[in-house]
């Protein structure tokens, strides 16, 4: 009964929350009611809420998901093109689903622009940009076939909480230990600097599609380390791995020459 009362309060906007958090609560509530007929039939408030919102953005998002992941790419494309986001979380979600659509249309390959945008979404603040951030991180990890540490770029001074995902191996703060010079780079040769790295035995550079573009294994790799990058413009991730399993990562942006 307590659950029903809480859900009814959400439906009636009786829980004081910031606008973005309230939007997300309504989105989750509509998804819940859509999937659980018995639940919404226990309350006239919840049933009326569900009926009223069947033409809302929340239903549109679910329709896009059903088309996109059900193989109806033309349907998903049409709905995405006609969607006019009303807040930051809607905009980020639209951007993420557009990336997924382009990925499906492009034979499961990411363009340079989509590679950069996916990484930017994955490294953004979930408190501002919503659950699309978690989706982007999961998609990124799927492409790489690994578990990555994600640290939210949230401002502690504004009261936004900083979160970290569960990991299975230590990964350093990309901005404090591993440096790429120059970055962004117009040249095809860059130097990697890692002052805190020790006993490094592997370096690899990976496209955001998950494809390994450069890999070297050696007994003891020292820094600075020079690497040639004959790749097209876009975003790439360099991984520095120590023998004990510690991994340092950094994003490289290659610009058109």
Image (tube, grey):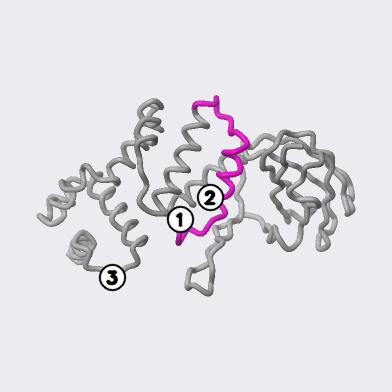
Mark with earlier residue (3, 2): 3
Apparent side of residue 11 relative to residue 105 in the rendered image (left or right): left
Q: Residue 182 shows which numbered tag? A: none
Above/below status of 17 relative to 197: below
Q: In this view, does 201 lie above or below 97?
A: below
Main SS class of the magenta portion in the image: helix
What residue occupies the far left of the structure in this picture? 44
Separation (CA) of disc 3 from disc 2: 27 Å
Q: Name the residue under label 1.
A: 129
- Binning the other alpha carbons within 10 Å of mark 2 as few (below 14), some (14 to 19) or many (20 upward) gives many
Q: Is 24 on the left or on the right of 253, as rendered? A: left
Please tell me the numbered disc located at residue 121: 2
> Residue 21, percent across and down?
36, 62
- For label 3, the residue is 16
Q: How far apart are marks 2 and 1 (CA)?
A: 8 Å
Q: Quadrant of residue 255?
A: top right
Counting residues from the N terminus, which is met first, the one under dot 2 or under dot 1?
A: 2
Residue 18: quarter of image: bottom left
Q: Earlier in the sequence, mark 3 or mark 1?
A: 3
Quadrant into which the C terminus falls? top right
Q: Are marks 3 and 1 in contact (CB under 8 Å)?
A: no
Q: How far apart are marks 3 and 1 (CA)?
A: 19 Å
Front-lying residue, 6 or 121: 121
- Expressed as whole percent of the image width and height from the top left, the position of residue 47 reads 14, 50
Query: At numbered mark 1, what does the secondary structure look like: helix, strand or loop?
Result: helix
Q: Residues within 10 Å of mark 3 (few under 14, many from 20)?
A: few
**Is label 2 in a helix, a strand or a loop?**
helix
Was residue 49 drawn as part of the magenta stretch in this picture?
A: no
Q: Residue at x 45, y 55 (%)?
A: 129
Give the residue drawn at x 16%, y 48%. 52
| Region of the chain picked out in magenta, as a range | 105-129
Residue at left offset 22%, top offset 42%:
55
């Amino acid at each position: 009964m307590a659950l029903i009362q809480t859900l009814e309060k959400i439906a009636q906007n009786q829980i004081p929350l910031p606008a973005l958090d309230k939007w997300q609560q309504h989105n989750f509530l509509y998804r819940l009611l859509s999937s659980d007929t018995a639940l919404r039939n226990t309350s006239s408030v919840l049933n009326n809420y569900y009926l009223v919102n069947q033409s809302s953005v929340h239903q549109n998002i679910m329709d896009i998901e059903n088309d996109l992941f059900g193989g109806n790419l033309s349907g998903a494309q049409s709905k995405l093109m006609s969607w006019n986001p009303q807040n930051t979380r809607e905009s980020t979600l639209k951007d993420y689903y557009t990336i997924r659509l382009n990925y499906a249309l492009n034979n499961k390959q990411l363009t340079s622009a989509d590679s950069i945008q996916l990484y930017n979404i994955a490294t953004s603040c979930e408190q501002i940009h919503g659950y699309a951030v978690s989706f982007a991180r999961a998609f990124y990890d799927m492409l790489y076939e690994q578990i990555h540490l994600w640290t939210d770029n949230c401002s502690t001074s504004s009261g936004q909480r900083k979160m970290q995902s569960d990991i299975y191996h230590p990964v350093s703060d990309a901005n404090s230990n591993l440096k790429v010079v120059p970055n962004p780079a117009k040249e095809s040769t860059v130097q990697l600097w890692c002052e805190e790295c020790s006993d490094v035995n592997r370096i690899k550079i990976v496209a955001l599609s998950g494809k390994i573009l450069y890999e070297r294994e050696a007994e003891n790799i020292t820094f600075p380390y020079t690497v040639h990058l004959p790749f097209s413009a876009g975003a790439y991730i360099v991984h520095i791995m120590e023998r004990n399993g510690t991994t340092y990562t950094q994003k490289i942006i290659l610009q058109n020459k």
